[in-house]
Image: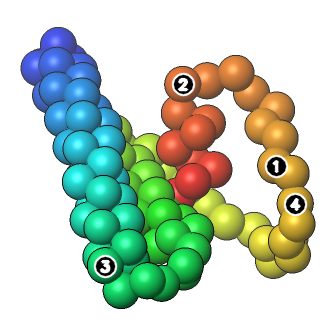
């Protein structure tokens, strides 16, 4: 049973990472084309932050990560440093 769960989580992680990268690439390209056609110079920063946050939450849930937030998040600009060296740190910080 453990092997099946681990295999499922690995497959889920590979699919969500690949799908997330593909989605961001395609939509980023479409945004660039539409901005160029309109002559707009808007930034995609807020959009990318929302997509990254949503993707990280999906991956965290699929991997079975449990997170608890305590206190208020720091105000930008901020530089977050993780005190552990795990493969899930990036997902946890982004989620």
Q: Mark 4: which secondary structure?
A: loop
Camera-side mark, 4 or 2? 4
Q: Which residue is mark 1?
A: 80
- Disc 1 to disc 4, C-alpha distance: 6 Å
Which of pointers 4 and 3 lies earlier in the amino acid sequence? 3
- Disc 1 to disc 3, C-alpha distance: 37 Å
From what the image shows, is residue 58 above or below residue 75? above
- Disc 4 to disc 3, C-alpha distance: 35 Å
- Disc 1 to disc 2, C-alpha distance: 16 Å
Contact flag, marks 3 and 2 (Cβ < 8 Å): no
From what the image shows, is residue 27 above or below residue 82? below
Contact flag, marks 4 and 2 (Cβ < 8 Å): no
- Disc 4 to disc 2, C-alpha distance: 22 Å
Contact flag, marks 1 and 4 (Cβ < 8 Å): yes
Q: Quadrant of residue 34?
A: bottom left
Q: Which residue is mark 4?
A: 78
Q: Mark 2: which secondary structure?
A: loop
**Mark on residue 37?**
3
Task: State whether residue 58 appears in this view.
Answer: no
Q: Which residue is mark 2?
A: 87
- Disc 3 to disc 2, C-alpha distance: 40 Å
């Amino acid at each position: 049973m453990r092997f099946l769960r681990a295999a499922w989580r690995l497959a889920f992680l590979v699919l969500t990472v690949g799908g997330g990268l593909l989605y961001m690439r395609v939509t980023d390209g479409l945004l660039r084309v539409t901005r160029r056609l309109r002559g707009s110079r808007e930034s995609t920063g807020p959009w990318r932050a929302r997509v990254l946050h949503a993707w990280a939450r999906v991956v965290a849930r699929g991997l079975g990560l449990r997170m608890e937030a305590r206190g208020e998040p720091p105000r930008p600009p901020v530089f977050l440093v993780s005190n552990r060296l795990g493969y899930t740190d990036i997902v946890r910080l982004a989620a």
